[in-house]
């Protein structure tokens, strides 16, 4: 009898808790649009944030409840956009293929390292130590922070310089966030012209530390027929919305900083 009463009390409490939870689940039930789950399944689940939302689930919810554009997923590309359109019963939005580009061409043949860094072998760690170990403080450090965050194996390090394979790049933007020198940007794959320098020094100072650096001479700016290239902070910058990939700036560049 000593054990029976506590067991009965415990059983009654459990029964009451179950009843209360059932009632609460009915009272506070929130209907979930099944399209959100289906759209989530149509996304690649990269959760990279390239769409501007916290992750794939947040983006799927925004599409259904906030009329977010259906073509923002770069890793999913046209395939995901098409599936989402089918779920919503709308026309598929155009998806422009994008890729990342490293705005630096300071490899081992063009510039030098000032010292060997014995600490944690990461670009961010080296950046905190005298601004980096390279002669050019604006260039690629080459320790692969971008490589470590790329889920698509699209980035390699060659001659102390990060290089991106556009065929494998999904433009998720993880490498953009990982680079402490802000050398990586996302651009349309169809745009073939890139300035591979981000130096903030004047031409003389840049040339002293890197033979491949942009000297800010503005010849490219004068040659561009559509005004797509400007010299800003001592280096040329391309407006990809205006660029027609004609190649005149590349041909005119005296230091071959445009590729």
Image: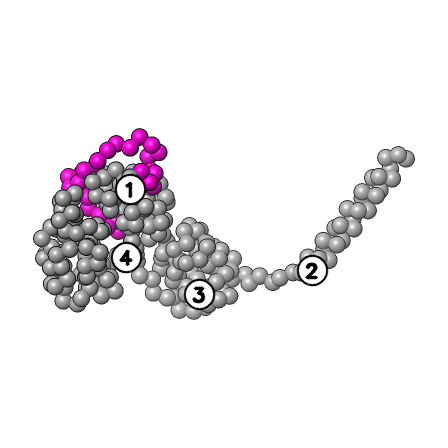
User: Of circles 3 and 1, which is in front?
Assistant: 1
Q: Residues within 10 Å of mark 1 (few under 14, many from 20)?
A: some
**Residue that label 4 marks:** 187
Q: Residue furthest top?
A: 118
Whole-angstrom CA distance, mark 4 to mark 1, is: 27 Å
The earlier-in-sequence mark between 2 and 3 is: 2
The segment highlighted magenta reads 101-129
Q: In what quadrant of the picture does the N terminus appear?
A: top right
Mark 4 or 2: in front is: 4
- Disc on res. 55: none
Mark 3 highlights which residue?
68
Q: Tag 1, which secondary structure?
A: loop
Q: Which one is earlier in the sequence, the residue at label 1 or at label 2?
A: 2
* Closer mark to the observer between disc 4 and disc 1: 1
In the rendered structure, which disc, 4 or 1, sits on the residue that comes first in sequence?
1
Residue 182 % position (x, y): 30, 50
User: Which residue is identified by label 2?
Assistant: 26
Q: Which residue is mark 1?
A: 131
Q: Is residue 48 above or below residue 130?
A: below
The reply to whether dot 1 and dot 2 touch (C-beta < 8 Å) is no
* Labels 1, 2: front one: 1
């Amino acid at each position: 009898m000593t054990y029976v009463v506590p067991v009965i009390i415990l059983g009654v409490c459990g029964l009451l808790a179950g009843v209360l939870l059932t009632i609460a689940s009915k009272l506070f039930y929130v209907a979930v649009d099944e399209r959100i789950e289906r759209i989530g399944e149509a996304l690649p689940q990269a959760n990279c944030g390239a769409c501007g939302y916290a992750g794939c689930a947040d983006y799927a919810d925004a599409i259904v409840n906030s009329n977010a554009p259906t073509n923002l997923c770069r890793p999913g590309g046209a395939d995901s956009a098409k599936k989402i359109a089918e779920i919503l019963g709308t026309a598929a939005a155009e998806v422009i293929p994008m890729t990342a580009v490293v705005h630096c061409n300071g490899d081992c043949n063009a510039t030098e390292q000032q010292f060997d860094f014995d600490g944690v072998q990461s670009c961010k760690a080296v950046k905190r130590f005298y601004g980096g170990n390279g002669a050019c403080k604006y260039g690629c450090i080459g320790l692969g922070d971008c490589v470590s965050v790329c889920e698509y194996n699209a980035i390699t390090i060659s001659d102390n310089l990060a290089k991106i394979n556009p065929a494998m790049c999904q433009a998720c933007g993880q490498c953009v966030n990982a680079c402490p020198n802000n050398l990586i940007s996302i651009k349309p794959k169809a745009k073939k012209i890139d300035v591979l320098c981000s130096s903030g020094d004047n031409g003389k100072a840049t040339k002293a530390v890197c033979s491949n650096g942009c000297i800010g001479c503005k010849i490219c700016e004068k040659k561009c027929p559509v005004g797509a290239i400007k010299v800003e902070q001592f280096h040329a910058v391309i407006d990809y919305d205006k660029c027609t990939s004609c190649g005149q700036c590349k041909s005119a560049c005296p230091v071959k900083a445009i590729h």
